[in-house]
């Protein structure tokens, strides 16, 4: 790729601006998490009066952070993996196969994105309770209810994005594989999935984040044992005080695994894969 | 082709299996002689509350053999949790919650009414402080809750600052209060900026705003609610609200920054940090002050207008009430738990731990509670308090009215002049919002 | 309307017809089955129930036996959506405000995301670091992001006023951000901060699939950078763009978390969006029928807007199947 001088300038300006925009709040997050509480209470200071790692120690006992973290990881990871599986299965026929009801299905799935959460929050809960009564599967206050909910929240967008990515892959690729005797599903697994890797990763990140930060449904579908981080963190604010330093220390700590995971997978998001496949 | 389709179907089945497996998460406990008790969060944290309540519940188990499974529910989740409990029937046996919700929850029909045998089972009406007992539900119907923790507003002041300013007595009338606040509003380090305000409040705190509109309104001879609906814009109420916002708008005895305060801790923090010399908050604020190692404060009655056009009301009859769910499998046991927690002995223990006021009149005779501030609080609660309007729309009213007053504070802080007509307009808008929604 | 292209006509004429007669005809159905079941359980049925509730008087009086809540036909709609009443006028004001908010947030997020994706789709040192960094705002739980910004915009002690008044001396007085008119802009800034990394991630993934040699050919032809962007990049990522814009628009329009976490139960008037307003009616006042009627209006607006959008951006005829 040839880069002009103008492009280099554009890149510099854009990246500088975005870096500052992104980093400034993160800097506040980091610096506040190592301040003693008295230092957090007054006017903001760029540097701590004294650096302390006590918040990182105290945060585990002020609230059961480890248990919330565990809950969030279980719910989010399971929901992401299942969402990817279900979405890949559904996206493939949408982009490759012809079948009756396809348009209905794709339109319905996309239109669910329009549903305002506040409209179906209570109904969803009421239905979960009914299902519990009918078949005895615990859906409220359990991991399962949250997993099913988050997994489905991620589906419409994931299906649409994946169908788009699959469609961009030339059909010749899998036809060649099928001539070699592979089944269609085999071709999907062995040919399409590797090529669509950037898309699958992007969608996986999306599904993960959707579940990771969700607040509204978690506040209704969890109880003390299954409370997730996104609502559990609120408990650093009590009737009497907000423990800013611990809250931000905890935020930092729980973000680190996510950031590291992003770092690891972002290298798989690199270009050239699909380009190579086209050649 | 066949094989692959089957593969897909078995993949779907596997999915279902995985889902079923993950269902085996943490679960509710066993049934039988175990009661579930949801307690709202009183102290500094959920954990702390559990530590306070467990001994009280252990004493109950010892007495009766009934186990109690305690869940302290944080306020941020409490309302939705109660909603789900009511709508699904998956409810705890016993629940405690802010007493201003009593009438609203009463309407759901999900709670055991306390009358006759049920009321006697929890100690009878005569056990309770009358003003607190009155908060149990709408007038004319058997209450569905009884008081558990009593609370009242009081004037907190900083005696050191009073001394520095040569003020000897806390103000008793509103006029004295405003004068005192003016004297205490100062630029202590002469840098041209006021750094000590006479009074501290939270302009964005809907609850405080609507409670003060109620208290000052009662003093002005007004009320927030009549039979037909809201009366926020009556002359007396408008004067009362103006009186409250004028502390910032015309008297300048309140830090304009506090127009943004809303979480119930910031005005207390300013008082602790000696940025303000007085504040009017509920007695539970003492836990916050204790947590901050602050004890340079005294407590006095809330100032009252003189001459007084209305009633000498100084506080709402604030506090937490306790209820028993209709769906409980063990109503008798649940009532015994309520009896235990409201008994004079447990009340002494609980009120010390949570800095609340006993709801059992007998507890006030206890040696352990004899001190001057307890006496002041008792007097305010027992003699100068009225419940907020006992209507199902109470919660909504606090939100709508409190936000309207918060809006006036925001206008004041961002530089607008506020006239009585502006206040009236805001109150009329709030009324219209209430009317339209109900 | 589908971004999911049909098999190209020239690829294998007649193969489709033959395929549908094969024993494997149920393959596509088997593949969409899990998704269909989940959508039905979590989205469709609750939604229908929600619409039903909008025709009932579901309040604290009836919530305990919600199945027997009285059916009141269009009562809730008449009460909630009458522009002459206090309720209706507040609703339509907030609807308009939400539209402005959505356009601003989606527009800015897309522009930032696209710019970053184009800039980072080139090779230079440190791009891996930036790619990860830019995703961090998106990875923070929304609660943390909102409360962090509220902390920074605090009038008396916050970082923003410190920079503006103390460090740079741009202003004499510390302005209020979280109350009054400025609250709207705070809402926009925080929302963009949260959302743009999503646009960036999706568009970057789409850019990756453009073969590099297309650009090389264009560069040899002497096309300018801007021309390459409009003539090659944009058309190549068109389908991703359309979905990303539509979905971001829908999410932003329904945004609840950020205003709720920034401002609590009631937002300042300048920042009162429609979802928190409906939440207040439903979950604070327990007037679910009314809240549901208002949400149905929201849904209708979204359906109409999406239909117009789809009609505008999609070439005629592509939606026939």
Image (cartoon, coloured by chain):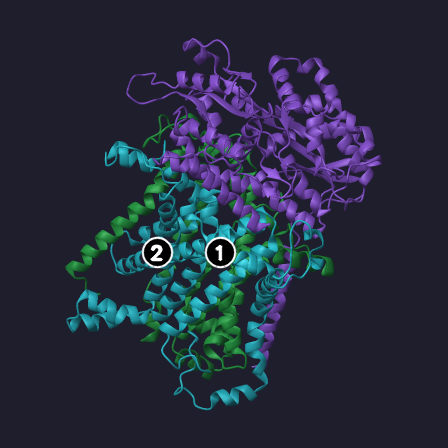
Chain colours: A green, B purple, C cyan
Distance, label 1 to label 2, CA atoms, is 28 Å
Which chain is disc 1 placed on?
C
The mark lying in front, picked from 1 and 2, is 1
Considering every residue shown, the one lying at the far right of the view is B117
Q: Is residue B170 left or right of residue B227?
A: left
Where is residue C16 drawn, in percent x and y?
49, 87
Quadrant containing the C terminus of chain A in the rendered view? bottom left
- Does residue A164 lie above or below C288 as drawn? below
Residue C315's quadrant in the figure? bottom left
Q: Is mark 2 on a helix, strand or loop?
A: helix
User: Is residue B12 visible to the viewer in this orientation of the structure?
Assistant: yes
Residues tagged 1 and 2 counted as in contact (Cβ below 8 A): no
In the rendered image, the quadrant that contains the N terminus of chain A is bottom left
In the rendered image, residue A74, in percent from the top left (x then y), is placed at 56, 51
As drawn, the label of residue C104 is 2
Residue bearing mark 1 = C84
Residue under the image location 52 percent in, 24 percent down: B280
Q: Which residue is drawn at 58% across and 36% down?
A: B224
- Mark 2 nearby-residue class (10 Å; few <14, some 14–19, many ≥20): some
**Residue B381 position in % (x across, y down):** 64, 23
Callout count: 2
Same-chain status of marks 1 and 2: yes
Q: Residues within 10 Å of mark 1 (few under 14, many from 20)?
A: few
- Give how far across and how far down residue B136 sits, in percent: 70, 35
């Amino acid at each position: 790729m040839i880069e002009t001088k103008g492009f280099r300038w554009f890149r510099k300006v854009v990246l500088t601006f975005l870096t500052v925009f992104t980093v400034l709040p993160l800097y506040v997050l980091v610096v506040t998490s190592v301040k003693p509480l008295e230092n957090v209470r007054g006017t903001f200071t760029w540097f701590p009066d004294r650096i302390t790692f006590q918040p990182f120690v105290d945060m585990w006992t002020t609230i059961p952070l480890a248990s919330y973290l565990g809950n969030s990881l279980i719910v989010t990871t399971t929901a992401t993996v299942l969402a990817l599986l279900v979405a890949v299965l559904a996206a493939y026929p949408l982009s490759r196969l012809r079948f009756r009801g396809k348009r209905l299905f794709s339109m319905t799935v996309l239109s669910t994105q329009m549903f305002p959460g506040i409209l179906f929050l209570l109904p969803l809960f009421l239905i979960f309770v009914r299902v519990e009564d009918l078949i005895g599967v615990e859906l409220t206050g359990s991991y399962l209810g949250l997993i099913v909910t988050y997994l489905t929240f991620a589906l419409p967008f994931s299906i649409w994005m994946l169908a788009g990515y699959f469609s961009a892959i030339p059909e010749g690729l899998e036809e060649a594989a099928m001539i070699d005797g592979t089944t269609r599903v085999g071709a999907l697994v062995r040919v399409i999935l590797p090529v669509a890797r950037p898309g699958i990763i992007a969608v996986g990140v999306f599904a993960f984040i959707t579940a990771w930060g969700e607040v509204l449904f978690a506040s209704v579908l969890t109880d003390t044992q299954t409370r997730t981080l996104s609502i559990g963190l609120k408990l650093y604010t009590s009737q009497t005080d907000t423990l800013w330093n611990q809250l931000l220390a905890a935020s930092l700590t729980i973000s680190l695994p996510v950031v590291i995971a992003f770092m690891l997978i972002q290298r798989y998001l690199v270009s050239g894969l699909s380009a190579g496949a086209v050649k | 082709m066949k094989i692959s389709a089957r593969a897909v179907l078995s993949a779907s089945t596997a999915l279902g299996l995985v889902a079923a497996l993950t269902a085996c998460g943490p679960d509710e406990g066993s049934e039988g002689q175990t009661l579930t008790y949801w307690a709202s969060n009183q102290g500094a944290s959920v954990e702390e509350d559990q530590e306070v309540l467990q001994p009280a519940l252990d004493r109950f188990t010892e007495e009766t053999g009934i186990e109690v499974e305690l869940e302290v529910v944080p306020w941020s989740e409490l309302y939705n949790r109660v909603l789900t409990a009511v709508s699904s029937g998956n409810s705890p046996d016993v629940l405690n919650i802010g007493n201003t919700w009593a009438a609203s929850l009463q309407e759901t029909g999900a709670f055991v009414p306390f009358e006759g045998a049920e009321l006697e089972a929890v100690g009878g009406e005569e056990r309770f402080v009358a003003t607190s007992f009155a908060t149990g539900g709408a007038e004319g119907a058997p209450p569905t809750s009884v008081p558990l923790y009593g609370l009242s507003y009081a004037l907190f002041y900083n005696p050191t600052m009073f001394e520095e300013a040569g003020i000897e007595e806390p103000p008793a009338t509103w006029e004295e209060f405003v004068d005192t606040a003016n004297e205490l509003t100062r630029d202590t380090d002469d840098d041209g900026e006021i750094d000590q305000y006479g009074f501290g409040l939270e302009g964005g705190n809907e609850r405080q705003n609507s409670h003060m509109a109620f208290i000052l309104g009662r003093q002005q001879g007004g009320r927030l609610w009549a039979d037909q609906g809201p009366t926020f814009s009556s002359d007396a109420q408008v004067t009362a609200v103006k009186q409250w916002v004028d502390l910032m708008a015309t008297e300048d005895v309140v830090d304009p920054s506090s127009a943004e305060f809303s979480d119930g801790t910031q005005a207390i923090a300013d008082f602790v940090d000696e940025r303000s010399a007085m504040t009017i908050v509920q007695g539970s604020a003492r836990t916050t002050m204790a947590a901050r190692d602050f004890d340079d404060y005294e407590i006095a009655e809330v100032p009252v207008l003189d001459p007084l056009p209305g009633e000498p009301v100084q506080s709402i009859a604030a506090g937490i009430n306790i209820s028993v769910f209709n769906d409980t499998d063990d109503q008798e046991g649940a009532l015994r738990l309520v009896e235990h927690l409201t008994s004079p002995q447990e009340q002494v223990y609980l009120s010390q731990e949570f800095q609340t006021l006993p709801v059992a009149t007998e507890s006030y005779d206890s040696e352990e509670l004899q001190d001057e501030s307890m006496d002041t609080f008792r007097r305010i609660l027992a003699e100068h308090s009225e419940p907020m309007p006992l209507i199902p729309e109470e919660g909504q009213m606090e939100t709508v009215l409190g936000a309207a007053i918060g809006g006036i504070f925001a206008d004041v802080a961002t530089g607008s002049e506020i006239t009585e007509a502006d206040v009236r307009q805001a109150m009329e808008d709030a009324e219209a919002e209430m009317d339209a929604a109900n | 309307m589908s971004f999911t292209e049909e098999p190209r006509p020239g690829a294998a004429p007649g193969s489709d017809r033959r395929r549908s007669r094969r024993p494997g005809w149920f393959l596509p159905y088997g593949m969409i089955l899990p998704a269909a079941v989940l959508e039905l359980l979590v989205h469709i049925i609750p939604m229908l129930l929600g619409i039903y509730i909008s025709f009932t008087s579901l309040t604290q009086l009836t919530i305990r036996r919600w199945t027997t809540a009285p059916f009141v036909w269009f009562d809730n709609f008449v009460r909630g959506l009458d522009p002459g009443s206090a309720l209706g006028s507040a609703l339509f004001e907030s609807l308009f405000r939400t539209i402005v908010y959505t356009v601003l947030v989606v527009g800015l997020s897309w522009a930032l995301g696209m710019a970053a994706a184009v800039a980072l789709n080139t090779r230079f040192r440190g791009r891996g670091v930036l790619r990860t960094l830019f995703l961090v705002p998106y990875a923070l739980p929304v609660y943390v992001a909102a409360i962090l910004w509220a902390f920074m915009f605090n009038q008396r002690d916050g970082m923003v006023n410190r920079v503006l008044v103390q460090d740079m001396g741009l202003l004499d007085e510390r302005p209020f951000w979280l109350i009054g008119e400025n609250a709207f802009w705070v809402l926009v800034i925080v929302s963009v901060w949260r959302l743009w990394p999503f646009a960036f991630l999706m568009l970057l993934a789409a850019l990756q699939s453009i073969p590099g040699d297309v650009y090389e050919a264009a560069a040899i032809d002497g096309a300018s950078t801007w021309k390459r962007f409009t003539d090659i990049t944009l058309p190549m990522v068109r389908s991703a763009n359309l979905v990303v814009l539509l979905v971001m628009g829908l999410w932003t329009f329904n945004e609840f978390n950020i205003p709720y976490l920034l401002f609590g139960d009631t937002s300042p008037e300048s920042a009162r969006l429609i979802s928190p307003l409906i939440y207040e009616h439903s979950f604070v006042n327990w007037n679910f029928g009314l809240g549901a009627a208002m949400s149905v209006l929201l849904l209708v607006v979204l359906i109409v807007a999406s239909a117009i959008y789809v009609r505008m951006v999609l070439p005629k005829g592509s939606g026939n199947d």
